[in-house]
Amino acid sequence: MATDFEEHRPHLLRVGYRITGSLADAEDAVQEAWFRWSRASDVREPRAWLTTVVARICLDRLTSATARRETYVGPWLPEPLVTAPDDEGPLAAVVRGEDVRLAAVLLLDRLTPAQRVAFVLHEALGTRYAEIGEVLGCSADAARQHAAAARRSLASAPVPARAPAATEQRVLAEFGAALARGDWQAVVSLLHPDITFTSDGGGRVATALRPLVGADKVGRFLAGLFAKYSFEMSGWTTVLVNGEPGLATPAADGVAASVTAFTVDADGRITAARQVMNPDKLHPWW
């Protein structure tokens, strides 16, 4: 049973993370699903059965998290999924799809819990509406309506396309080098004029309480940080954050740890930077 379960683990983590936006909640749900499965008998379709269990657990987590979000300090970002470029572990399998990019998970956060569960299960996994209804405690028709409402909401703001991986890597290398030498003109030249910089400190770490928009504004913000703190580029690690290029920085010299994901467009400019500094979301790494 353990061997069979491990085959499904990346899939189940993907389901849990897309529903909750939290790796910790997804892992807890997968672990609980294992306990229930190990005690179950006559499970004819393990993947479907486990998916339903994880979705039910995550629905409860999502409902309570949605209530807590009302008092969250500053912008909220999903818990980052950090992997090394050459990682071949279970988490690396989770982040291979476009649907776990931070931008994609943020769009799901606009939905109600029921809409989010219905959309993830049906659109991404092909789960039948009758089974989705069992998870949500509603009829198949009601589940269909939740999924349809989710599709309409998401269609109004599609996830932007990414640049080729080689372009992403080149731009991130140039960006890091420009930061290291304090060449702010070069930094700004790599930013899209309408770039959005979002930082999530959750009230635990001092950071911008609203997203910054515009290359000049973001460039000045970064320059101010470098003027205030002494950054060592050797302490920064190039990583993948939800499959996109990113930088991970450990806590040092009064600066909180952070993980930042960058979205690069086809023209080689950074269109978005999403920085997670809330230590509750970085616990698996630091």
Image (spheres, grey):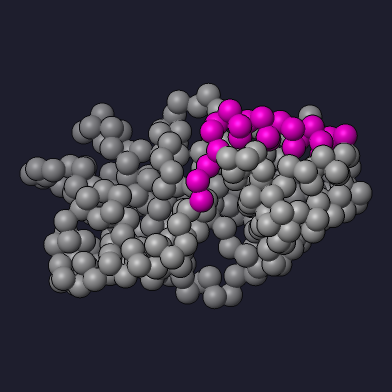
Q: Is residue 100 left or right of residue 254?
A: left
Locate the C terminus by quadrant: top right
Which residue reaches farthest front?
267
Residue 62 lies in quadrant: bottom left
Residue in the foreground of this view, choosing between 77 and 194: 194
Residue drawn at the location 71% of the way across and 54% of the way down: 193
* Residue 65 to residue 96: above or below: below
The percent coordinates of residue 61 (x first, y second) are 40, 63
For residue 242: magenta?
no
In the rendered image, residue 137, in percent from the top left (x then y), is placed at: 21, 70
Tag count in the figure?
Answer: 0
Tell me what residue is drawn at x 79 percent, y 32 percent: 177
Residue drawn at point x = 45 percent, y = 33 percent:
92
Residue placed at 71% from the left, 67% from the top? 209
Nearest the viewer among 118 and 21 is 118
Q: Is residue 263 above or below residue 117?
A: above
The kind of secondary structure the magenta stretch mainly shows is helix
Span shown in magenta: 160-181
Q: Quadrant location of the N terminus?
A: top left
40 relative position to 19: left or right: left
- Residue 144 lies left or right of residue 57; in this view the side is left
Which of the two residues, 268 or 187, is positioned nearer the viewer here? Answer: 268
In the displayed orientation, state which residue is furthest to the right.
227
Where residue 47 appears, as percent x and y from the top left, is: 21, 42
Q: Is residue 43 visible?
A: yes
117 horizontally vs 88: left or right: left
